[in-house]
Amino acid sequence: MMRRITPVIMCGGAGTRLWPSSRESFPKQFIPFFGPRSSFQDTVLRVSDPSLFGEPVIITGRDYSHLVADQLEGVGRTGTILLEPMRRDSGPAIAAAASFVRKRDPGSRLLVMAADHVIRELSVHAAIEEQLFYPTVRSRVEDEKDDVLEALEEHHIVKWTLAELEDMDPKDERFDAKMTVLMESVRHHMKEEEREMFPQVRKAVPRAELQDLGERMRAAKAGVPTRPHPRAPDEPPGNAVAGLGAVVYDLARDAASGATRAAGQAVRRVKT
């Protein structure tokens, strides 16, 4: 019998890096920057399969508990909210969640997640559209070639911005400006697709095929790059081939980043 997985969602950050859109009273993880739901709500929905996951444990500050409760209700989900008495790094928060879950469900495994993975989410979204959606549009919808090429150029700009943000210190004076440009670019891109491209696709492609395409796009999330690669090909077959190498690279980099964070937390614990 498979052990149940308990998601632990950390969303206690103040979000002041994205001021004024995100501010201490309403942090970025609760703001729907790139769609109808916030990144917190998207994170909750990713772990909502009852056959795999138990009720999530959400770690946040007292000032944000009402936001968590409201947004859980907004997507029809429930969760256990643990309040941090003061802001610390992720180590103490994870330890508190582990202690709580061990008492509540001793056989459960923890899946620790942050609620604001903007770079990862946008990178995955771009890769899926480039591998599956745009080729379908070009092959099935007349007179949409120019719109697809324009969309690919917009992806290219977004990926370069994401790549710069990924390696930038949040304290850098250009960080906020780049995040603002990123949000504006993504919102413009989404509005154009919803207003111009999507209606043409719905007219040209039968509903059953669209449903099949949606299923393939959802399944593709597990095998596409999770980081921006603006120099990589963005059309088939080159993007599929390059994507395999990018996935391996991203997994290795994610593992290295995790080891670095763990080492840093260990050093801080020794010092204190």
Image (spheres, rainbow, N blue to C red):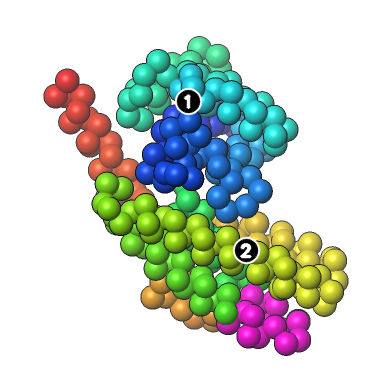
- 88 or 5, nearer to the observer: 88
Q: Secondary structure at mark 2?
A: helix
Q: Judge the density around disc 2: few (<14), some (14-19), many (≥20) Cα neighbours within 10 Å.
A: some
Could you tell me residue 48's position as x and y percent? 65, 37
Q: Quadrant of the N terminus?
A: top right
Which residue is labeled 2 in the image? Answer: 190
Could you tell me residue 130's position as x and y percent? 57, 72
In the picture as drawn, the residue positioned furthest to the top comes out as 103
Q: Nearer the viewer, mark 2 or mark 1?
A: 2
Which residue is at a point 64% across and 80% down the rendered structure image?
147
Amino acid at the residue labelled 1: Thr
Which residue is at a point 36% across and 30% down the rendered structure image?
90
Residue range corresponding to the magenta coloring: 134-149
Residue 85, located in which quarter of the rendered image? top left
Mark closest to the chain's N terminus, 2 or 1: 1
Left or right of 62 on screen, residue 188: right
Amino acid at the residue labelled 2: Met
Could you tell me residue 25's position as x and y percent? 48, 30
Which residue is at a point 30% across and 57% down the rendered structure image?
174
Disc number for residue 60? 1
Q: Is residue 269 above or below residue 28?
A: above
The CA distance from mark 2 to mark 1 is 30 Å
Q: Judge the density around disc 1: few (<14), some (14-19), many (≥20) Cα neighbours within 10 Å.
A: many
Is 15 one of the magenta-colored residues? no
Could you tell me residue 200's position as x and y percent? 78, 75
Q: Is residue 83 above or below residue 241?
A: above
In the picture as drawn, the residue positioned furthest to the front comes out as 20
- 239 or 13, nearer to the observer: 13
